[in-house]
């Protein structure tokens, strides 16, 4: 089913409980990839990837740790017709509902690439994940340590993405080099929500 209307929730496929690779094999396989096949990714694989980053567990915790269980991170996805059953655009992940909301019908990857020092692989990656953090939410509890906690949390989430991608024969690379304001403007972020990390993902040649 093709979703055409903005802001309607698109439920993702339920996460798997078992994969094909052992944890140890996955660790050995993990490496940064910057070249991707122009290959369609199944909706199940895509859903699993998103869940690995910020999926919610039955008791309300998420798959990656968070200081004080605040979970200040938001996850956005950009794609251009490379995910089965998903039309191009910008989507936001709703962890509680394990669903996506389509925010923009444009393919924003080329603009994101420009904002990230023209790292071209971002413009052509089948899926691009952007992690942002609500600095206000975490600052209220942790004051001046909030910023440090955000970067620590980003590392946890990023490693989940790296490992889940590797376990499903996908590749990714952590991208930290970009202009914050330009990325914030592109995603229409409020001033307290800061872009932290970008992960282009795709099948590896
Ligand atoms: C905080 C951080 C920021 C990074 N930023 C970029 C980036 O902007 N562009 C890029 O191509 N790689 C980036 N990388 C990926 C590193 O270049 C890569 O992890 C490193 O070369 C080691 O290779 P490996 O991941 O295959 O082990 C970043 C990695 C980290 C941890």
Image: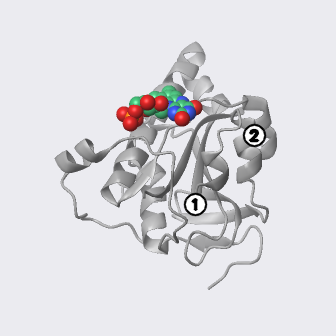
Q: Is residue 139 visible?
A: yes
Other-residue count near label 2 (Cα within 10 Å), few / some / many at <14 / 14–19 / ≥20: some
Q: Dividing the picture into quarters, in which one does residue 185 lie?
A: top right
Secondary structure category for the residue under label 2: helix
From the viewer's perspective, is residue 149 above or below residue 160? above
Q: From this viewpoint, is residue 187 visible?
A: no
150 horizontally vs 183: left or right: left
Picture coordinates of residue 135, whole percent (x, y): 64, 29
Answer with left or right where residue 19 lies relative to residue 87.
Answer: left
The image shows residue 83 at horizontal and vertical percentages of: 56, 70
Q: In the image, what residue occupies the spot 74% across and 50% down? A: 110
Within 8 Å: ligand 1 and the Cβ of disc 1? no
Task: Identify the image quadrant of the C terminus.
Answer: bottom left
Q: Is residue 112 left or right of residue 83?
A: right
Q: Say which quadrant the N terminus sits in.
A: bottom right
The residue that mark 2 highlights is: 114
The numbered mark at residue 39 is: none
Position of residue 109 relative to residue 145, above or below, is below
Q: Secondary structure at mark 1?
A: loop
Image vertical order of residue 177 relative to residue 157, above or below: above
Q: Which residue is mark 1?
A: 126
Quarter holding residue 184: top right
Nearest to N terminus: mark 2 or mark 1: 2
Residue at x 51%, y 69% (from the top left corner) = 39
Residue 115 position (above or below residue 37): above
- Image coordinates of residue 144 in percent, x first then y, are 59, 14
Q: Residue at x 58, y 21 (%)?
A: 147
Q: Residue 138: x, y in percent?
A: 58, 29
* Residue most extreme to the bottom: 1
Spatial CA span between label 2 and label 1 = 17 Å
Does the residue tagged 2 have its C-beta within 8 Å of any atom of ligand 1? Answer: no
């Amino acid at each position: 089913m093709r979703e055409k209307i903005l802001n309607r929730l698109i439920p993702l496929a339920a996460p798997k409980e078992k994969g094909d690779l052992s944890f140890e094999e996955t660790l050995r396989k993990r490496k940064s990839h910057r070249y991707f096949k122009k290959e369609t990714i199944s909706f199940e694989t895509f859903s699993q990837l998103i869940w690995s980053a910020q999926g919610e567990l039955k008791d309300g915790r998420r798959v990656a740790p968070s200081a004080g269980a605040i979970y200040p991170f938001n996850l956005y996805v950009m794609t251009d017709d490379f995910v089965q059953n998903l039309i191009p655009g910008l989507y936001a992940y709703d962890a509680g509902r394990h669903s996506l909301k389509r925010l923009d019908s444009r393919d924003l990857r080329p603009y994101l690439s420009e904002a990230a020092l023209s790292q071209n692989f971002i413009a052509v990656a089948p899926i691009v994940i952007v992690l942002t953090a609500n600095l206000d939410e975490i600052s209220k509890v942790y004051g001046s340590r909030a910023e440090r906690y955000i970067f620590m949390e980003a590392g946890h989430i990023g490693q989940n993405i790296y490992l889940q991608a590797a376990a499903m024969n996908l590749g990714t690379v952590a991208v930290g080099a970009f202009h914050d304001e330009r990325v914030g403007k592109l995603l229409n972020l409020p001033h307290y929500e800061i872009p932290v990390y970008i992960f282009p993902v795709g099948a590896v040649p």
